[in-house]
Image (tube, grey):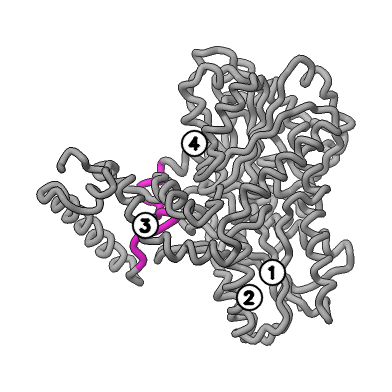
Amino acid sequence: MRSGRIQSSASCSASSSSTFPHPPCLSSASRHCKFPRLLSPRALSLSQRVSRNCLVPETSQFSFSKQSSTNKKRLFPVNVGALVTSNTEAISTGPLVAEEKIGVLLLNLGGPETLDDVQPFLFNLFADPDIIRLPRLFRFLQKPLAQFISVLRAPKSKEGYASIGGGSPLRRITDDQAEELRKSLWAKDVPAKVYVGMRYWHPFTEEAIEQIKKDGITKLVVLPLYPQFSISTSGSSLRLLESIFRDDEYLVNMQHTVIPSWYQREGYIKSMANLIEKELQKFDRPEKVVIFFSAHGVPLAYVEEAGDPYKAEMEECVDLIIEELEKRKITNAYTLAYQSRVGPVEWLKPYTDDTIVDLGRKGVKGLLAVPISFVSEHIETLEEIDVEYKELALESGIQNWGRVPALGCEPMFISDLADAVIESLPYVGAMAVSNLEARQSLVPLGSVEELLATYDSQRRELPAPVTVWEWGWTKSAETWNGRAAMLAVLVLLLLEVTTGEGFLHQWGILPLFH
């Protein structure tokens, strides 16, 4: 049974319209790769375009083919038969490390550690203009609206966090990953410090950057803990870094580089295959189990209108893992679906819940869930997958359920991340920006910069990742619902101003009208 198999991307490589510069090989293994290093593991400088010593010419052109549910054209010319491997012994790190202070910044989403943290965490999330976008005229309402939504959603969110122990384990796991990565780098003769920067909760990215400055770091490698790149995850974190770097003289002069995604790396692929193989053996009939890859979803418009490579990278990632399993004589049927959608806008399909129901109708009795876009356990794995989707699967007739754990601190995975950092170090030195006149946009170059630039040009048209008002089933209904909601906000604001009473005054947001 192979009905769930995703089409191989190898056949699509010739049709890709994207062109990329090729960096010099960093190891002997890389010279034998069957595909060019694109987003991974090549590290891209935040300031590459403005560097006078840039390795990539200013005239390099980058283009992106748009995706749709019927168009299987790959964004990148990847040969599925090849993995990005590393051979750090072939890299001369001595000159790069000597008399330098190396830092690695791990980026992640963050999560509330206690139930009391849930509401302020949600406020930080919804106060991000990349999450809820308001027209320019109403941007002064961003924080009041975030406060209102966070208070409204907090009770239900607290129930979810209470069911997994009273808070997210994300910070603890990420701190453990940082420590293991530091140990691995030191074991490979790279004495680096590793920092953790969260987007919406402690330790915030700003806090990590301040510590980096205090420690006098001179070479920084930025490593988002998202295997696949998306403008809503890695892109949001990099945009925040851009704003932090822009006006800071120390940061402008510090040599730095970014590893945007690393889903092709051998250590990641083999670690995922190891976990899947181990969990399959827990079933009575492992060969009959369907491997169910569940990835965090993004709005469809991000892929089709903004050129987000997330869908293409996710499919390629699954292909590589399945190929590794087939080398081990594991030929189970498999499928890929997307979870965690919010609101009435269309997200990447197929949806996880719909797919589970459909598999049950087709008579599937064994299902192994694989959280493919997560490297740490958190609310979406521990509650959404382990509780909600498991219950749905059993109700749909699926009798045997299993779930692959997130990678966490798997030794092979951590060691390979360390290799990715070491391989990026030559780029840190080669793309340094020491000229203060180069103080320009610090979004990573190449595919990442062009991607974010495209996204910015479409921001007014793109739907928000989190939709505030969730009623309405047609585009016309959504439009009028949005207008009605905005009118309601304006009426509430008018009442606040005229009466001097209301939730904005209670929260101290409009103290001038007391």
Label 3's element?
helix
User: Which circle's residue, 1 or 2, is located before the other in the chain?
Assistant: 1
The residue lying toward the viewer, choosing from 229 and 104, is 104
Badge 1, how many Cα within 10 Å: few under 14, some, many 20+?
many
User: Is 475 located above or below residue 136 in the figure?
Assistant: below
Q: Nearer the viewer, mark 1 or mark 3?
A: 3
Which region shows up in magenta?
A: 457-470
Residue 411 at what x, y percent from top left?
A: 82, 48
Task: Inspect the image, locate mark 1, and give the three-letter code of the amino acid beneath it.
Answer: Ala
Q: Which disc is residue 369 wearing?
A: 1
User: Which circle's residue, 4 or 2, is located before the other in the chain?
Assistant: 4
Label 2's element?
helix
Residue 391 at what x, y percent from top left?
A: 60, 78
The answer to whether the residue labelled 1 contacts the one labelled 2, judged by CB atoms less than 8 Å apart, is: yes
**What is the distance, in whole Å, between disc 2 and disc 3 at their CAs?**
29 Å
Badge 3, how many Cα within 10 Å: few under 14, some, many 20+?
some
Q: Nearer the viewer, mark 4 or mark 2?
A: 2
- Would you name the residue on which mark 3 appears? 151
User: Which circle's residue, 1 or 3, is located before the other in the chain?
Assistant: 3
The answer to whether the residue labelled 1 contacts the one labelled 3, judged by CB atoms less than 8 Å apart, is: no
Badge 4, how many Cα within 10 Å: few under 14, some, many 20+?
some
Residue 12 at what x, y percent from top left?
A: 68, 55
Mostly what secondary structure, the magenta segment?
Answer: loop
The residue lying toward the viewer, choosing from 183 and 427, is 183
- Would you name the residue on which mark 4 appears? 240
Q: Is residue 342 visible?
A: yes
